[in-house]
Image (cartoon, grey):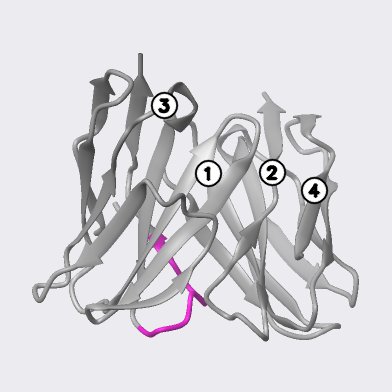
Amino acid sequence: DSGVTQTPKHLITATGQRVTLRCSPRSGDLSVYWYQQSLDQGLQFLIHYYNGEERAKGNILERFSAQQFPDLHSELNLSSLELGDSALYFCASSVSGQPNTQYFGPGTRLTVL
Amino acid sequence: EDQVTQSPEALRLQEGESSSLNCSYTVSGLRGLFWYRQDPGKGPEFLFTLYSAGEEKEKERLKATLTKKESFLHITAPKPEDSATYLCAVQPRSEAQKVTFGTGTKLQVIP
Protein backbone atom coordinates (compact mmCIF):
# COMPACT_ATOMS: atom_id res chain seq x y z
CA ASP A 1 0.00 0.00 0.00
CA SER A 2 1.58 3.26 -1.20
CA GLY A 3 -0.55 5.51 1.02
CA VAL A 4 -2.08 7.23 -2.03
CA THR A 5 -5.82 6.72 -2.41
CA GLN A 6 -7.93 7.12 -5.52
CA THR A 7 -11.68 6.97 -5.95
CA PRO A 8 -13.60 5.51 -7.59
CA LYS A 9 -11.81 2.28 -8.58
CA HIS A 10 -13.99 1.79 -11.63
CA LEU A 11 -16.15 4.19 -13.59
CA ILE A 12 -18.37 3.34 -16.54
CA THR A 13 -20.00 6.19 -18.39
CA ALA A 14 -21.26 7.25 -21.80
CA THR A 15 -19.75 9.43 -24.50
CA GLY A 16 -20.34 13.13 -23.95
CA GLN A 17 -20.54 12.81 -20.17
CA ARG A 18 -18.38 14.43 -17.49
CA VAL A 19 -16.66 12.63 -14.61
CA THR A 20 -14.47 13.56 -11.66
CA LEU A 21 -11.63 11.41 -10.37
CA ARG A 22 -10.32 11.99 -6.89
CA CYS A 23 -6.86 11.50 -5.39
CA SER A 24 -5.56 11.86 -1.85
CA PRO A 25 -1.75 11.98 -1.60
CA ARG A 26 0.37 10.36 1.09
CA SER A 27 0.41 12.24 4.36
CA GLY A 28 3.01 15.00 4.10
CA ASP A 29 3.35 14.91 0.31
CA LEU A 30 2.76 18.26 -1.36
CA SER A 31 2.94 17.20 -5.01
CA VAL A 32 0.26 15.40 -7.00
CA TYR A 33 0.83 14.11 -10.53
CA TRP A 34 -1.84 12.74 -12.85
CA TYR A 35 -1.12 10.11 -15.51
CA GLN A 36 -3.17 8.31 -18.14
CA GLN A 37 -2.28 4.72 -19.02
CA SER A 38 -3.75 3.12 -22.10
CA LEU A 39 -2.83 -0.25 -23.59
CA ASP A 40 -0.97 1.11 -26.58
CA GLN A 41 0.63 4.24 -25.17
CA GLY A 42 1.90 3.46 -21.71
CA LEU A 43 1.92 6.04 -18.94
CA GLN A 44 1.38 9.59 -20.20
CA PHE A 45 2.01 12.55 -17.90
CA LEU A 46 -1.01 14.85 -17.73
CA ILE A 47 -0.48 17.51 -15.07
CA HIS A 48 1.39 18.31 -11.85
CA TYR A 49 0.27 20.32 -8.82
CA TYR A 50 2.45 21.40 -5.94
CA ASN A 51 0.88 22.75 -2.76
CA GLY A 52 -2.23 23.92 -4.61
CA GLU A 53 -0.52 25.45 -7.63
CA GLU A 54 -0.24 24.06 -11.13
CA ARG A 55 3.43 23.40 -11.89
CA ALA A 56 3.51 21.63 -15.24
CA LYS A 57 1.25 20.38 -17.98
CA GLY A 58 1.91 17.42 -20.20
CA ASN A 59 -0.29 15.89 -22.87
CA ILE A 60 -3.52 16.98 -21.24
CA LEU A 61 -6.49 17.65 -23.48
CA GLU A 62 -8.44 20.90 -23.18
CA ARG A 63 -11.48 18.82 -22.19
CA PHE A 64 -9.57 17.75 -19.07
CA SER A 65 -8.83 19.93 -16.07
CA ALA A 66 -7.53 19.42 -12.58
CA GLN A 67 -7.11 21.19 -9.30
CA GLN A 68 -5.50 20.66 -5.91
CA PHE A 69 -7.38 21.77 -2.85
CA PRO A 70 -6.09 23.30 0.43
CA ASP A 71 -6.17 19.87 2.10
CA LEU A 72 -3.90 18.71 -0.79
CA HIS A 73 -6.31 16.25 -2.33
CA SER A 74 -6.69 16.60 -6.07
CA GLU A 75 -9.45 16.10 -8.59
CA LEU A 76 -9.18 15.40 -12.31
CA ASN A 77 -12.22 16.46 -14.31
CA LEU A 78 -12.84 14.85 -17.68
CA SER A 79 -15.61 16.28 -19.85
CA SER A 80 -17.20 15.62 -23.25
CA LEU A 81 -15.90 12.10 -22.92
CA GLU A 82 -14.95 10.11 -26.01
CA LEU A 83 -14.39 6.39 -26.50
CA GLY A 84 -10.65 7.04 -26.69
CA ASP A 85 -10.61 8.42 -23.15
CA SER A 86 -11.11 4.91 -21.80
CA ALA A 87 -7.96 4.19 -19.82
CA LEU A 88 -6.48 3.78 -16.38
CA TYR A 89 -5.91 7.09 -14.63
CA PHE A 90 -3.24 7.17 -11.93
CA CYS A 91 -2.27 9.83 -9.54
CA ALA A 92 1.08 9.88 -7.81
CA SER A 93 2.45 11.96 -4.99
CA SER A 94 5.88 13.05 -3.87
CA VAL A 95 7.20 15.05 -0.95
CA SER A 96 8.86 17.80 -2.95
CA GLY A 97 8.14 19.58 -6.19
CA GLN A 98 10.32 17.06 -8.00
CA PRO A 99 9.10 13.65 -9.29
CA ASN A 100 12.25 11.91 -8.02
CA THR A 101 10.35 9.31 -6.04
CA GLN A 102 6.69 9.09 -6.89
CA TYR A 103 4.20 6.97 -4.97
CA PHE A 104 1.36 5.85 -7.20
CA GLY A 105 -2.22 5.21 -6.23
CA PRO A 106 -4.15 2.10 -7.32
CA GLY A 107 -5.73 3.94 -10.26
CA THR A 108 -9.23 4.58 -11.57
CA ARG A 109 -10.32 2.49 -14.54
CA LEU A 110 -12.52 4.61 -16.80
CA THR A 111 -14.64 2.94 -19.44
CA VAL A 112 -16.50 5.17 -21.90
CA LEU A 113 -19.26 3.39 -23.82
CA GLU B 1 10.81 15.32 -27.69
CA ASP B 2 12.03 12.91 -25.03
CA GLN B 3 11.80 9.23 -25.93
CA VAL B 4 12.15 6.02 -23.96
CA THR B 5 12.33 2.63 -25.65
CA GLN B 6 12.31 -0.55 -23.62
CA SER B 7 13.31 -3.99 -24.82
CA PRO B 8 12.33 -6.70 -24.97
CA GLU B 9 8.58 -6.09 -24.79
CA ALA B 10 8.14 -9.40 -23.04
CA LEU B 11 10.56 -11.83 -21.42
CA ARG B 12 9.97 -15.31 -20.10
CA LEU B 13 12.59 -16.75 -17.74
CA GLN B 14 12.97 -19.94 -15.80
CA GLU B 15 13.36 -19.45 -12.06
CA GLY B 16 17.06 -18.79 -11.39
CA GLU B 17 17.83 -17.75 -14.98
CA SER B 18 19.46 -14.31 -14.83
CA SER B 19 18.86 -11.69 -17.53
CA SER B 20 18.79 -7.97 -18.28
CA LEU B 21 16.14 -5.52 -19.39
CA ASN B 22 17.14 -2.58 -21.56
CA CYS B 23 15.97 1.03 -21.53
CA SER B 24 17.26 3.30 -24.30
CA TYR B 25 16.52 6.97 -23.99
CA THR B 26 16.77 10.26 -25.82
CA VAL B 27 16.51 13.35 -23.67
CA SER B 28 17.89 16.85 -23.89
CA GLY B 29 19.85 16.72 -20.67
CA LEU B 30 19.08 13.95 -18.21
CA ARG B 31 18.19 14.93 -14.68
CA GLY B 32 17.18 11.45 -13.53
CA LEU B 33 16.22 8.01 -14.77
CA PHE B 34 13.69 5.94 -12.84
CA TRP B 35 12.75 2.28 -12.71
CA TYR B 36 9.33 1.18 -11.54
CA ARG B 37 7.66 -2.19 -11.16
CA GLN B 38 3.97 -2.57 -12.02
CA ASP B 39 1.82 -5.55 -11.11
CA PRO B 40 -1.38 -6.19 -13.09
CA GLY B 41 -4.20 -3.83 -12.09
CA LYS B 42 -1.98 -1.85 -9.71
CA GLY B 43 -0.08 1.40 -9.74
CA PRO B 44 3.65 1.45 -10.45
CA GLU B 45 5.96 0.90 -7.49
CA PHE B 46 9.19 2.89 -7.29
CA LEU B 47 12.42 0.90 -7.49
CA PHE B 48 15.40 3.13 -8.31
CA THR B 49 16.56 6.58 -9.37
CA LEU B 50 19.84 6.98 -11.26
CA TYR B 51 21.36 10.39 -11.89
CA SER B 52 24.65 10.02 -13.73
CA ALA B 53 26.44 7.68 -16.11
CA GLY B 54 28.28 4.95 -14.25
CA GLU B 55 25.90 4.96 -11.32
CA GLU B 56 24.55 1.64 -10.05
CA LYS B 57 21.82 0.83 -7.54
CA GLU B 58 20.89 -2.55 -6.06
CA LYS B 59 17.89 -3.96 -4.28
CA GLU B 60 17.62 -7.67 -3.54
CA ARG B 61 17.87 -9.47 -6.91
CA LEU B 62 17.70 -6.26 -8.95
CA LYS B 63 20.55 -4.03 -10.06
CA ALA B 64 20.12 -0.92 -12.21
CA THR B 65 22.93 0.67 -14.19
CA LEU B 66 23.14 3.81 -16.29
CA THR B 67 25.15 4.94 -19.30
CA LYS B 68 24.77 8.10 -21.37
CA LYS B 69 22.30 6.44 -23.74
CA GLU B 70 20.73 3.55 -21.89
CA SER B 71 19.98 1.87 -18.62
CA PHE B 72 19.89 -1.81 -17.75
CA LEU B 73 17.93 -3.60 -15.09
CA HIS B 74 19.76 -6.80 -14.26
CA ILE B 75 17.77 -9.54 -12.57
CA THR B 76 19.88 -12.17 -10.83
CA ALA B 77 18.39 -15.59 -10.07
CA PRO B 78 14.80 -14.38 -10.45
CA LYS B 79 11.89 -15.88 -8.54
CA PRO B 80 8.24 -16.16 -9.65
CA GLU B 81 7.36 -13.17 -7.43
CA ASP B 82 9.58 -11.01 -9.65
CA SER B 83 7.01 -11.43 -12.43
CA ALA B 84 5.70 -7.96 -13.30
CA THR B 85 6.01 -5.20 -15.87
CA TYR B 86 9.11 -3.10 -15.38
CA LEU B 87 8.87 0.53 -16.45
CA CYS B 88 11.68 2.94 -17.19
CA ALA B 89 11.20 6.72 -17.15
CA VAL B 90 13.36 9.78 -17.76
CA GLN B 91 13.26 13.21 -16.19
CA PRO B 92 14.70 16.00 -18.33
CA ARG B 93 16.75 18.83 -16.88
CA SER B 94 14.80 21.50 -18.72
CA GLU B 95 11.26 20.50 -17.76
CA ALA B 96 11.88 18.48 -14.65
CA GLN B 97 8.20 17.80 -13.92
CA LYS B 98 7.54 16.09 -17.25
CA VAL B 99 8.59 12.51 -16.75
CA THR B 100 8.42 10.34 -19.87
CA PHE B 101 7.74 6.64 -19.39
CA GLY B 102 8.55 3.73 -21.66
CA THR B 103 5.93 1.10 -22.42
CA GLY B 104 7.64 -1.45 -20.23
CA THR B 105 9.00 -4.99 -20.31
CA LYS B 106 6.61 -7.67 -19.14
CA LEU B 107 8.61 -10.26 -17.23
CA GLN B 108 7.31 -13.73 -16.46
CA VAL B 109 9.36 -16.02 -14.24
CA ILE B 110 8.34 -19.66 -14.42
CA PRO B 111 8.91 -22.00 -11.44
Image quarter where the C terminus of chain A lies is top left
Q: Is residue B42 visible?
A: no
Frontmost residue, A20 versus B33: A20
Classify mark 2: residues with Cα within 10 Å, few (<14), some (14-19) or many (20+): many
Q: Main secondary structure of the magenta part?
A: loop
Residues at discs 3 and 2 in contact (Cβ within 8 Å): no
Residue A95: x, y in percent?
A: 33, 80
Q: Is residue A58 among what the camera can see?
A: yes
Position of residue B84 relative to residue B3, above or below, is above
Residue A82 image label: 3
The single residue placed furthest to the left in the displayed view is: A71
Eye-nearest disc, 4 or 1: 4
Q: Which residue is mark 4?
A: B6
Disc 1: which residue:
B38
| Residue B85 magenta | no
**Front of the two marks 1 and 3:** 3
Q: Position of residue B43 (x, y in %)?
A: 42, 46
Span shown in magenta: A96-103
Callout 3: helix, strand or loop?
A: loop
Distance between the alpha carbons at the discs numbered 3 and 2: 26 Å
Question: Callout 4: helix, strand or loop?
Answer: strand
Q: Same chain for the residues at labels 1 and 3, yes or no? A: no
- Alpha carbons under labels 1 and 3: distance apart: 27 Å
Q: Which mark is residue B104?
A: 2
Task: Find out whether the residues at labels 4 and 2 contact each other: C-beta distance under 8 Å.
Answer: yes
Crowding around mark 3 (Cα neighbors within 10 Å: few <14, some 14 to 19, many 20+) is some
**What is the three-letter code of the residue carrying label 4?**
Gln
Circle 4 residues within 10 Å: few <14, some 14–19, many ≥20 = many
Q: Chain under label 4? A: B
